Amino acid sequence: MGDHLRKLMQETIDVVLRLTNQTKLLDTDKVVRRAVEARLPFCDTINVLQVLLLKTLREGECTDPILLDTLQVSIQGVVAGKDLERNIGI
């Protein structure tokens, strides 16, 4: 299902780029593009946190519900950040 969704998303991006005569998303909106670019480095920090939480979970030491919630949020954060990065061509 993931491959299918990624294919549909890429097809949608291609149509938007063709309709807007852009080569990258947000090419015509430099302010928003810079705002997105400024947030991307935070993905690295979230990714490190995610690795540490996964290690703790695998070792059987992660039983605190707050840590489990943090792991889930970190996964969503990395995915969202990487999608932004990939979709605007950074």
Image: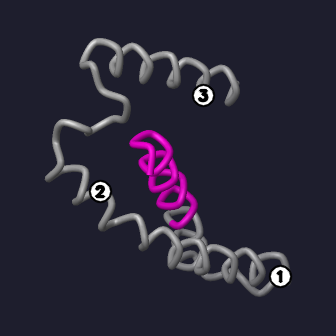
Q: How many marks?
A: 3
The N terminus appears in which quarter of the rendering? Answer: top right
Residue identified by numbered label 2: 36
The image shows residue 44 at horizontal and vertical percentages of 53, 73
Crowding at mark 2 (Cα within 10 Å: few <14, some 14-19, many 20+)? some
The quadrant where residue 4 appears: top right
Task: Check contact, mark 1 vs mark 3: CB within 8 A.
Answer: no
- Residue at image location 57% in from the left, 75% down from the top: 65
What kind of secondary structure does the magenta stretch mostly adopt? Answer: helix
Residue identified by numbered label 3: 6
In the rendered image, the vertical position of residue 9 relative to residue 64, given as above or below: above
The image shows residue 43 at horizontal and vertical percentages of 48, 68
Disc 3 secondary structure class: helix
Tell which of 32 and 3 is nearer to you: 32
Q: Amino acid at mark 1?
A: Gly
Q: Nearer the viewer, mark 2 or mark 1?
A: 2
Crowding at mark 1 (Cα within 10 Å: few <14, some 14-19, many 20+)? few
Over which residues does the magenta segment extend? 74-90
Crowding at mark 3 (Cα within 10 Å: few <14, some 14-19, many 20+)? few
Q: Amino acid at mark 2?
A: Val
- Residue at image location 30% in from the left, 26% down from the top: 22
- Residue at image location 83% in from the left, 76% down from the top: 58
